[in-house]
Image (cartoon, helix red, strand yellow):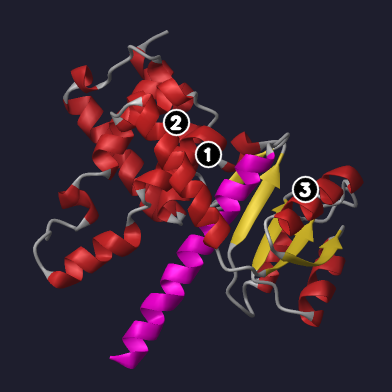
Amino acid sequence: MSRSQLVAEHLPLLRRYARALTGNQASGDAYVAAMLEALLQDQTLLDESKGARAGLFRLFTQIWNSVSLNDDGDPVTPAASERRLSNITPLARQAFLLLSLEGFSEEEVAFILDTGVGEVRALTDAAGRELAAEIATDVLIIEDETFIAMDLESLVRNLGHNVIGVARTHTDAIALAKTKQPGLILADIQLADGSSGLDAVNELLKTFEVPVVFITAYPERFLTGERPEPAFLISKPFQPAMVSAVASQALFFQRNSRNRNQRAVAS
């Protein structure tokens, strides 16, 4: 397999990870594009000693942690420093997402983050403490498969959140959101009655802002770069840690955005 084929094979899930770090498609894709540009200029940057996929994530991490990129080339001003602090996902969450969302081993995560396995374990412990400290919120689940919905409901409650309801159709989702505005939505994309969880979410987002995590058995259909894509995407079947990590990340960005808005109003 050629180098370009190797990159193309792993690019969709790298884009998913990039969006999970940045909180939106445009920013995530910009970092992936920067990585690809660097790789085109110097193919020796890709270290494949732990495999092509881990090598790509390692190179992406090096680009991601670049001060000049994160600060838009202006790393010295207070405003730039604040942007960096508010935009960069802490290292602990990077480790946790690599383990939980992307399924890398501790050894691979250590390679990607250029650290030791012991440090990776310390980082994931720190991420666990951050998860426990997240503000509890009201969660709307849009899922038509009974057992998956039950698993999600149990998981969400164990994380300390409140479930306002489980919607199995587009119509149900809109009705439930009208009874109480959720602080987080977990949504299947394709529902059994032919309706779309994606359409339901888009309709809800016209009236209020809420972080959304999409769950689908066919993530590759939504990682093409040909249209607007979900910022947070989980593949079925999923592990509880995966849902926990991504939901926490979505709430992390929502909370930071709200805090920045409050500071802007106060100033």
Please tell me which of labels 3 and 1 falls first in the chain. 3
The answer to whether any part of residue 56 appears in the image is: no
Q: Nearer the viewer, residue 243 or 106?
A: 106
Left or right placement of residue 132 versus residue 197 in this view: left
Q: Residue type at mark 3?
A: Gln
From mark 3 to mark 1, how far is it between C-alphas? 17 Å
Q: Nearer the viewer, residue 256 or 59?
A: 256
Residue underneath mark 3: 190
Residue 194, percent from left and from top: 86, 51
Nearer to us: label 3 or label 1: 3
Q: Residue type at mark 1?
A: Thr
Quadrant hosting residue 58: top left
Chain part drawn in magenta: 240-267
The answer to whether residue 94 is above or below residue 159 is above
Residue underneath mark 1: 224
| In the image, residue 9 lies in the stretch drawn in magenta | no
| In the image, residue 253 lies in the stretch drawn in magenta | yes
Res. 259 mark: none
Q: Nearer the viewer, residue 137 or 202?
A: 137
Quadrant hosting residue 248: bottom right
Residue underneath mark 2: 11
Residue 57, percent from left and from top: 37, 30
